[in-house]
Amino acid sequence: MAYLTLLRPKQWVKNFLVFVPIFFAQDFFGKDKIWQASLSFVVFCFIASTVYIVNDIFDKKTDQNHPKKQYRPIASGKISIKAAIFMATFIFSIGIILAYIFIPKAIPLLLIYVFLNLIYSYRIKHIVVFDVLLVSVFYLLRILIGGFATSTPISSWLILCVFFASLLVIIGKRLGEQGQLHKRVVLQYYSNDFLRQLLSVSSSLVIASYGLYSILGFHLGDHPDLVVYSIFFVVLGVFRYLYLIYSSAEIEYPEKLIFADKIVFGSIVSWVIYMFFIIYI
C-alpha cells in the first residue's frame, strides 16, 4: 500500500488533459486517436509518478515537519530513499519503453517534462513567481503531449486558456498554504497582498481568454456561435473556486476540492456536456 501511495494515483486525474486535443479536434471517437490518447495517459501516469517520487525524495526533511505530508511514505520512513530511487527508475523505464513502442513522437516532451521537474525540485520551486509559472507549464505539457501523441494540432487559444487556468489553480493553492504554520520555503517571500493580486490577474485572464476564444477562435460544429454561452459555466467555476480559496481548508489540494465541491464539479461537467453537444451533435 505504501508503494501505491508513493505513486500518488489521486494526482493522475490531471493527466486526463492529454485527451483535450482530440476532444477539440472532433476526433474523440476515432479509434486510432482515442487509443493513442489512452496510451499517452497511461505513459504520463508512469512518468508523472516518477517525478512525484523524486520530489518526495528532495522534500523528505520539510515533509517530516508538515502536519499532513509527514505521513507520506518517504517522509514517514515506510519507504527508504534507496527503495524510492529504485521504484522511480523502474516506473520511469516502463513509461519510456511504452512511449518508445506506442507514442514515440511524445518522447521529447516527456523528457522535457522530467528535466523541468528536476530543475523545479532542485531550485526553481524556491524562486518567487518562477515556481508558479513552471508548475503551470507542467499542466500545459500534458496538453502538448496529448497533441503530439495523437498527431493533433492544438489551438493557440486552447494553450492560453489552459495556461491561465493552471495559474489560477496554482496561485490559489499557494494562497491557501500561506496561512499554515509549516509551509513551503518560497512562501516566505510571498505576501498575502501579492498573492491576491496574482489571483485577481490570473482569474481575469482565464475569463478574458476563454471569452475571446469562444467568440474569435472557436469554429467547430454546426453552431459555433452557441459556444459563447458556455462562458457561464467558466465564470461559475472560477468564482466558486475563488470563494473556496478563502473559505476551505482543503484548497491546498485542488485536485480533491474539484471533486468534493458540488458546484465546481458541476460546472466542469456541465461545461463538458455543453461543449460535447456543440462539437459532436
Image (spheres, rainbow, N blue to C red):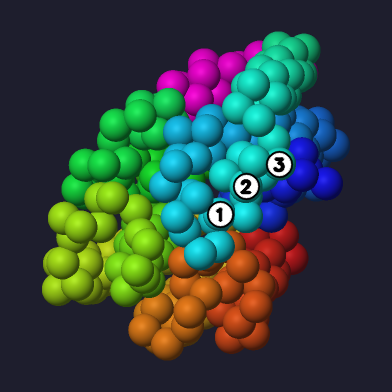
Of the pair 160 and 29, the residue shown nearer to us: 160
Determine whether label 2 and label 1 are within 8 Å by CB. Answer: yes
The kind of residue on which mark 3 rests is Lys
Determine which residue is flagged by label 3. Answer: 78
Q: What residue do we see at 74% from left, 65% from top?
A: 281
Q: What residue do we see at 34% from left, 53% from top?
A: 184
Query: Can the viewer see residue 43 in this picture?
Result: yes
Q: What residue do we see at 48% from left, 49% from top?
A: 63
Question: Vertically, is 35 above or below 220?
Answer: above
Query: Can the viewer see residue 92 in this picture?
Result: no
Q: Please tell me whether the stretch drawn in magenta is mainly helix, strand or loop.
A: helix
Q: CA distance from mark 2 to mark 3?
A: 6 Å
Determine which residue is flagged by label 2. Answer: 76
Answer with mark 1 or mark 3, whichever residue precedes in sequence. 1
Of the pair 67 and 120, the residue shown nearer to us: 67
Q: CA distance from mark 1 to mark 3?
A: 11 Å
Answer with mark 2 or mark 1, whichever residue precedes in sequence. 1
Question: Vertically, is 124 above or below 219?
Answer: above
Determine which residue is flagged by label 1. Answer: 70
Of the pair 100 and 8, the residue shown nearer to us: 8
Determine whether label 2 and label 3 are within 8 Å by CB. Answer: yes
Start-end of magenta stretch: 102-115
Question: Vertically, is 14 above or below 78?
Answer: below
